[in-house]
Image (tube, helix red, strand yellow):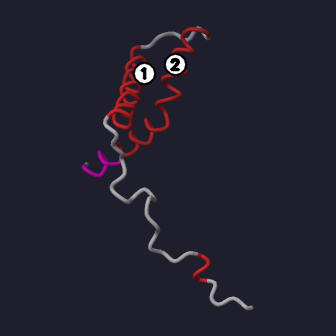
Amino acid sequence: MKRTLRELYGAGILFFYYFKWPMVLGYPALIAWAGYPRWWVADALWLYCLALIVKDFVRKFILKKSYCEEGSCGSQQSALPSRDDQAGPQAP
């Protein structure tokens, strides 16, 4: 049961990470110009996606925080050797 809940949580995070901008921009356009009928579930999802966008904006621009830990987002050189280091000595 616990594993299933973790999988659903992970799927929800991925779903809303990629879905929030198309939902916030597209759903009102569908209602206004395409005659799409309003549905309370879609309205609730739209509000949730809008809240996620506001949270991301506040966290990034107002609080100046990152989701990455210190040095984990590629700001430091990787400990793995580069391709040039693995090539061996070059002929003169």
State the SS at label 2. Answer: helix
63 relative to 22 in the view: left or right: left
Nearer-the-camera pick, 29 or 40: 29
Q: Is residue 67 above or below residue 54?
A: below
* The image quarter in which residue 65 lies: top left
Q: Which residue range is magenta in the image?
A: 2-7
Q: Is residue 90 above or below residue 74?
A: below
Q: Which residue is mark 2?
A: 27
Report the amino acid beneath label 2. Answer: Tyr
Classify the position of the C terminus by image quarter: bottom right
* In the image, farthest residue toward the left: 2
Which numbered marker is on residue 22?
Answer: none
* Amino acid bearing label 1: Trp
Q: Is residue 10 above or below residue 59?
A: below
Q: Residue at x 31, y 36 (%)?
A: 63
Q: Residue furthest right?
A: 92
**Farthest-out residue, front:** 92
Q: Residue at x 48, y 23 (%)?
A: 24
Looking at the rendering, which quadrant does residue 73 occupy?
bottom left
The foreground one among 45 and 74 is 74
User: As drawn, is 68 to the left or to the right of 87?
Assistant: left
| Label 1 residue SS | helix
